[in-house]
């Protein structure tokens, strides 16, 4: 939809629907790396987007592998909690992510709950978002996009902070429960833009607009938090 071609290395099988995650079966770390290596050796990649990791062992294995390909930029979506509230990465995995992956990232895209876990701070205002973004820059990330969807109010603010860059992307709140996959979609959309040569602010702005469109076009499936539709 945005001109990129995604090649996925599966880190875990999940049993889930719109009401929750009912089981997670991690893939052995060496097989996760094998998936990455064979695709990169054959096709290559302009950028790597990291989403759900599921375990500290997989987190460490991916960090080790990234050390062998230092020239490929990384977009890190620090997936730790699902839309339905299920825990998808435990505390040791979170610590490994903070120590090994955040310093490798061109951009980190936490939601408010993930930003709180990574920094140990509470976030309830845009000013708080800027504080945790600064913390993650200090932890080694080159850029941070803190997603403000969990704040109250009729307007949503996503805050981008990087060296010499501060940008706010403001959108009207859409009254819907069908937001399953918003974080994954946003990070993937940003990665698609970066792979095509856009700057981080340009890619983030287009991706935010795309996700807003995908939320508006959600088909309304399931009894819980349904998936997004097709963005424009």
Image (tube, rainbow, N blue to C red):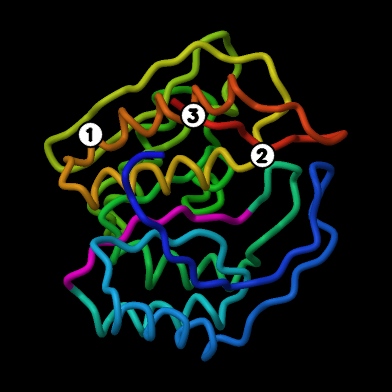
Which segment did they paint magenta? 71-80
Q: Position of residue 37 (x, y in %)?
A: 37, 84
Quarter placement of the N terminus: top left
Q: Nearer the viewer, mark 3 or mark 1?
A: 3
Q: Residue at x 58, y 73 (%)?
A: 11
103 in the magenta segment: no
Q: Secondary structure at mark 1?
A: helix
Q: Residue at x 69, y 42 (%)?
A: 83
Q: Are marks 2 and 3 in contact (CB under 8 Å)?
A: no
The residue singled out by tag 3 in the image is: 231
| Residue ranking furthest to the bottom | 30
The residue singled out by tag 2 in the image is: 180
Query: In this image, 92 relative to 158: left or right?
Result: right
Mark 2 burial class by Cα count in 10 Å: few <14, some 14-19, many 20+:
many
Q: Residue at x 60, y 56 (%)?
A: 80
Q: Position of residue 123 (x, y in %)?
A: 52, 33
């Amino acid at each position: 939809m945005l001109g990129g071609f995604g090649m996925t290395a599966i880190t875990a099988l999940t049993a889930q629907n719109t009401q929750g995650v009912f089981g997670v079966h991690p893939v052995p770390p060496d097989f996760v790396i094998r998936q990455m290596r064979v695709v990169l050796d054959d096709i290559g990649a302009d950028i790597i987007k990291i989403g759900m990791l599921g375990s500290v062992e997989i987190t460490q294995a991916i960090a080790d592998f990234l050390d062998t390909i230092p020239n490929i930029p990384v977009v890190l979506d620090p997936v730790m909690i699902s839309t339905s509230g299920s825990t998808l990465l435990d505390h040791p995995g979170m610590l490994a992510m903070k120590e090994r992956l955040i310093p490798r990232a061109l951009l980190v895209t936490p939601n408010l709950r993930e930003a709180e876990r990574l920094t140990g701070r509470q976030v309830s205002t845009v000013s708080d978002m800027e504080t945790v973004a600064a913390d993650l820059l200090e932890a080694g990330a080159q850029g941070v996009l803190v997603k403000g969807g969990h704040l109250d109010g009729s307007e949503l603010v996503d805050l981008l902070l990087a060296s010499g860059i501060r940008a706010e992307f403001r959108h009207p709140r859409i009254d819907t429960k069908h937001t399953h996959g918003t974080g994954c979609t946003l990070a993937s959309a940003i990665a698609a833009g970066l792979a095509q040569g856009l700057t981080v602010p340009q890619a983030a702005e287009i991706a935010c607009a795309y996700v807003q469109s995908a939320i508006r076009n959600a088909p309304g499936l399931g009894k819980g938090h349904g998936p997004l539709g097709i963005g424009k």
